[in-house]
Image (spheres, rainbow, N blue to C red):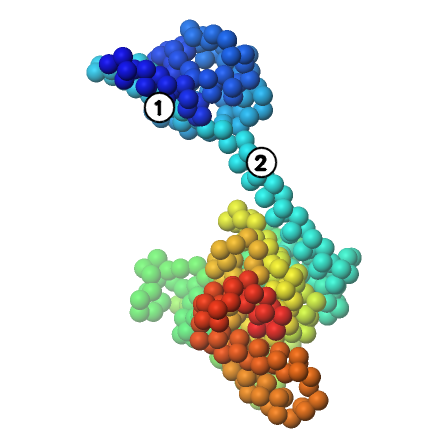
């Protein structure tokens, strides 16, 4: 028995982790030498019988896991700071007698000072990488050449001209017509106009003309009275025009409306009044109309598919938004902007490598901003490291696969027709062709590296070097 007790005492005293024991009221009963070392106290210090309040008052450590256990009567874990500046991870556990009385609180503590220091250094390194990544982008486009406001980015000459136009029209009730390819940011621009107008404290309501059938569009826009049609709500329903009163109504894809609905919309725009479906009561709504389309409405007018009088009503202030391929200066900015939003949302510190930024900036982005945003999110999710330095072609959507299927044939043709290529250039062409074929076969650079008996870092570097 004595041997058993002496063994326990030996283990207790030699433990590198701190062990600290109090009774149920918080008075110190026992502690091992590691506690004295962490607290920075002399070896002959006697703290038995001291209450936890003494340790806190003397600044020996803070906060106290023991006090939290006594208060909550359940195990507690926390980070504690000692008088000497050490950071400790404390796990305090309560023990009860048969009657449920708290008799002991045993705290087991690990020194995590160095671990936290490394973590902080790592966070600083990530922040520095992000900072210098932004600085590199600034060098490429010019430090003071762009505008970022309300989630919108205006860096190219075309977009800066649009920004100036938006500033002029935002605070007027003029009808604005936004035209541009799908995904160029028409909805975001419409919201920006609303946010800068006198109507900003009222509702912004978006209605996509392609998502509602023509038979329901009128009741959705104007509302209806009870029993107006089969399936109608008994009490009727207010329409979007009533809900958007004093605010902004954004009609997206307006070119999809048929001529009958165009006529009814025109009537409202001219008079600011309407009748709910099934009602004779005339209602009024003061809304600002912003429309958007990816179609050529002027051409549709000529073809008889869009009313000319409606066109001139909604296009008092037309704005053509260029596709992303015509404003490539903004691609690095958009990439980093979307990545920052994801970092903030998920509490991460991921950054793009220069090679990835360069590669992504050369893509056509036929899906425009919507495509680039979705691609960044996929890269963010699939990257296991903080530094995103590889791009799997499956992640970049739309026409990338079609484009790359033709590359191998182009390489062979170049080899056959260009006899002036040096040995090094020929080897590079062959190497790129091999990597392209491997990429079609495998989903990851690790799999490619395994088949080619290489390393993942080498294959990743080659992919970036050859813009694969």
Residue 442 position, x and y percent, is: 44, 72
Q: Residue at x 59, y 50 (%)?
A: 201
Residue 314 position, x and y percent, is: 62, 72
**Badges 2 and 1: C-beta atoms under 8 Å apart?**
no
Q: Badge 2: few (under 14), some or many (20 or more) residues near its Cα, within 10 Å?
A: few
Place residue 59 in its image quadrant.
top right
The answer for how far apart the CA atoms under marks 2 and 1 are is 27 Å
Q: Describe the element under mark 2 as helix, strand or loop.
A: helix
Would you place residue 148 above or below residue 407 in this image? above
Closest to the observer: 227 or 86?
86
Would you place residue 104 above or below residue 467 in this image? above
- Which residue, as the protein is rendered here, is positioned at the far left? 98
Residue denoted by label 2 = 117
Q: Quadrant of the N terminus?
A: top left
Place residue 464 in its image quadrant.
bottom right
Q: Quadrant of the C terminus?
A: bottom right
Q: Residue at x 67, y 90 (%)?
A: 418
Q: Residue 347, can we see it?
A: yes
Residue denoted by label 1 = 93
Q: Residue at x 53, y 28 (%)?
A: 87
Left or right, 105 with respect to 151, comes to: left
């Amino acid at each position: 028995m004595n041997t058993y007790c002496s063994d326990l005492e030996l283990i207790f005293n030699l433990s590198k982790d701190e062990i600290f024991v109090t009774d149920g009221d918080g008075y110190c009963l026992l502690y091992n030498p590691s506690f004295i070392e962490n607290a920075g106290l002399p070896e002959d210090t006697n703290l038995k019988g001291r209450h936890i309040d003494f340790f806190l008052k003397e600044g020996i450590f803070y906060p106290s896991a023991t006090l939290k256990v006594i208060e909550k009567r359940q195990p507690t874990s926390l980070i504690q700071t000692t008088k000497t500046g050490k950071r400790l991870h404390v796990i305090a556990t309560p023990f009860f007698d048969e009657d449920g009385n708290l008799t002991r609180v045993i705290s087991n503590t690990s020194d995590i000072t160095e671990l936290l220091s490394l973590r902080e250094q790592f966070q600083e390194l990530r922040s520095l990488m992000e900072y210098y990544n932004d600085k590199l982008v600034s060098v490429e486009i010019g430090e003071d050449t762009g505008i970022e406001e309300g989630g919108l980015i205006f860096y190219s000459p075309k977009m800066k001209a649009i920004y100036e136009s938006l500033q002029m029209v935002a605070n007027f009730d003029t009808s604005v017509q936004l035209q541009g390819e799908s995904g160029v940011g028409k909805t975001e621009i419409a919201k920006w106009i609303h946010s800068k107008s006198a109507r900003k404290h009222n509702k912004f309501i978006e209605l996509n003309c392609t998502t509602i059938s023509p038979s329901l569009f009128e009741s959705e826009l104007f509302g209806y009275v009870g029993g107006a049609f089969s399936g109608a709500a008994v009490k009727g329903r207010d329409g979007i025009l009533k809900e958007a009163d004093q605010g902004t109504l954004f009609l997206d894809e307006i070119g999809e409306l048929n001529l009958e609905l165009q006529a009814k919309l025109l009537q409202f725009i001219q008079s600011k009044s309407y009748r709910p479906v099934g009602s004779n009561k005339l209602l009024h709504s003061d809304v600002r109309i912003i429309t958007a389309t990816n179609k050529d409405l002027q051409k549709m007018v000529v073809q008889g598919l869009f009313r000319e009088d409606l066109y001139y009503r909604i296009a008092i202030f037309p704005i053509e938004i260029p596709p992303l391929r015509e404003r490539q200066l903004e691609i690095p900015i958009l990439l980093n902007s979307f990545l920052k939003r994801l970092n903030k949302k998920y509490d991460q510190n991921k950054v793009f490598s220069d090679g990835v930024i360069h590669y992504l900036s050369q893509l056509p982005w036929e899906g425009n901003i919507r495509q680039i945003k979705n691609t960044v999110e996929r890269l963010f999710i699939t990257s296991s490291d903080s530094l995103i330095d590889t791009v799997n072609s499956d992640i970049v959507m739309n026409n990338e696969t079609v484009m790359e299927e033709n590359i191998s044939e182009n390489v062979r043709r170049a080899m056959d027709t260009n006899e002036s290529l040096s040995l090094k250039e020929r080897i590079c062409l062959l190497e790129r062709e091999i990597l392209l074929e491997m990429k079609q076969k495998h989903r990851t650079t690790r799999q490619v590296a395994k088949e080619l008996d290489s390393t993942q870092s080498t294959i990743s570097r080659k992919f970036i070097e050859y813009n694969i």
